[in-house]
Amino acid sequence: MKTFVPQLLLSMREYSAAKFGRDLVSGVIVAIIALPLSIALALASGVAPEQGLYTAIVAGFVISLFGGSKVQIAGPTAAFATIVAGVVAENGMGGLALATLLAGLILVLMGLLRMGSLIKYIPYTITTGFTAGIAVTIVIGQLKDFLGLTTSAAPVETVEKLKAAFLALPTVNWAALGVGALALVILIVGPRFLGKIPPSLAAVVVTAALVQLLGLPVNTIGDLYSISSAPPSFQAPALSFEMVSAVLPDAFTIAVLAAIESLLACVVADEMTRSKHNSNMELVAQGLGNACSALFGGIPATGAIARTAANIKNGGVSPVAGMVHAAVLLLILVLLMPYAALIPMPAIAAILFIVAYNMSGWRTVRDIVRQSPKSDIAVLALTFALTVVFDLVIAIGVGLGLSCLLFMKRMSDVAVIREWRYLDGTESEDGRLKPVPEQAMVLDLIGPLFFGMVDKLPHIGPDPEKRALILRMRGVPAMDVTALKGLRRLLEECRAAEITLLLSHVRTQPLSVMKKSGFFEEVGAENFCPNIDAALERAASL
């Protein structure tokens, strides 16, 4: 169980007052950054603004307390916005709470089963494709508020939202557009001039003051939502078999996405701090954080790359910074939350535009398109399109399926089964001549031996001039049960033709498969040779 030691306990071994001072300053700064983002992401998810803060407070604290990273900051992220909005639209807040709770349990199980390292097997093209797709869905979802459009319906699907926004273009509120544009300018140029002041905070303060002082006809959060400054309270979701069945697919989606996002954030943090995170402990912490978030009125949470990077840049050195960030947000919620009602909706949309731009990874997409094989580009494009048009579940499922098929096709293409060329009783291999008995033939197997290349195994018929077939398997790193079936067919054909089958240099994994299945005994231990020279000697002795 040494694998499951929270990073907080490890950090405390060498903790000091100086480190606490750095964590305290960084935690306060990150909390100020997280404040407008948490509210904006809650609204983008179709829930009340304070629920974004509940998530950052509860999940942020729990994940820092139990996490496997020193500097990870967790909370609501843009990746969940469309998923959460869909769950709320279909199953209400009770369904969302149950889905988040189940996702938390799945994440804990993934961590306990040490599945942290398995996340790396999701292809880069898929994560890039669905991340870019999520960015586009966020932008489309915020067009209504940024332009101040008046629509007759509130669609959930991204394509329907785009259609509704296009049809409502004649209703553009120019005051709202101006406020949104001003917020966008502050967010873009602010980092150059505002120093330590978060541009998102400056944008909401300036635009809120402008709307109130000039009395502009622009919707604010208070116009559309009722805001509560009450701290998070325990809310057990209602359990029923029907609801569990309805939200279980969404729970798996949330769990997988949370695992991917959090571990990617940990990798980024490792590169910035030259440290190493504990992936399995991080998954357990993400599970506990999401479960607690669900029980205290929050939404799904995961590691936030931008807030984690801000924590590192501002001096955070331990999980204490993430815990301070959660505590500061709790104080803000209780003392200052009513003022959030003054924030204009176009400013929230502008913040989410920047979030979408930063997560889109358009430079990465450009590089993949320029440098990668067409098959990788196809996986990226398909995952992106399915994320935008349908949802993340379909996108990841189809993307993974296509990636697996393409991988197997590539492995099948590079795998080779070839017969040696015989030159007057000798065979030329790497410039060396090896004598081959006249009544023997040698097949070189190169590459993984799996179901995609079994058809390359030759068929053996009666041949009075041949008495031995050598399979040289030095180049076979692994094999599966379908390949084993193909070898059994080859063995039966050899016996029928009175030809002895010899295997040379069988590596660890294929040999284990052969022994476990009984194939080793069927061939005979004497016919397994450690190298090709021994196999040739064995063939000469037959």
Image: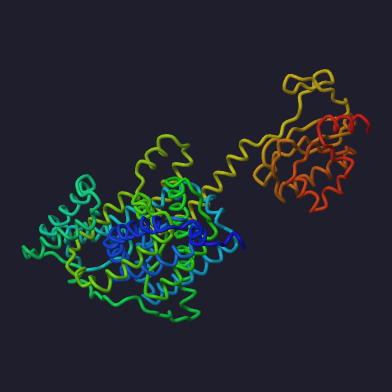
Quarter of the image where the C terminus is located: top right
Q: Residue at x 88, y 42 (%)?
A: 495
Q: Is residue 489 left or right of residue 218?
A: right
Q: Residue furthest left?
A: 214
Q: Position of residue 133 (x, y in %)?
A: 37, 52
Towards the viewer: 242 or 19: 19
Q: Position of residue 238 (x, y in %)?
A: 44, 81
To which quarter of the image does residue 209 belong?
bottom left
Q: Residue at x 46, y 58 (%)?
A: 15
User: Is 499 rendered above or below residue 481?
Assistant: above
User: Is 228 rendered above or below residue 5?
Assistant: below
User: Is 25 rendered above or below residue 475?
Assistant: below
Towards the viewer: 326 or 254: 326
Q: Is residue 33 left or right of residue 220?
A: right
Q: How is the image coloured?
A: rainbow
To which quarter of the image does residue 18 belong?
bottom left
Q: Position of residue 479 (x, y in %)?
A: 70, 46
Q: Residue at x 45, y 60 (%)?
A: 258
Q: Position of residue 146 (x, y in %)?
A: 19, 58
Towards the viewer: 478 or 77: 77
Quarter of the image where the N terminus is located: bottom right
Towards the viewer: 52 or 471: 52
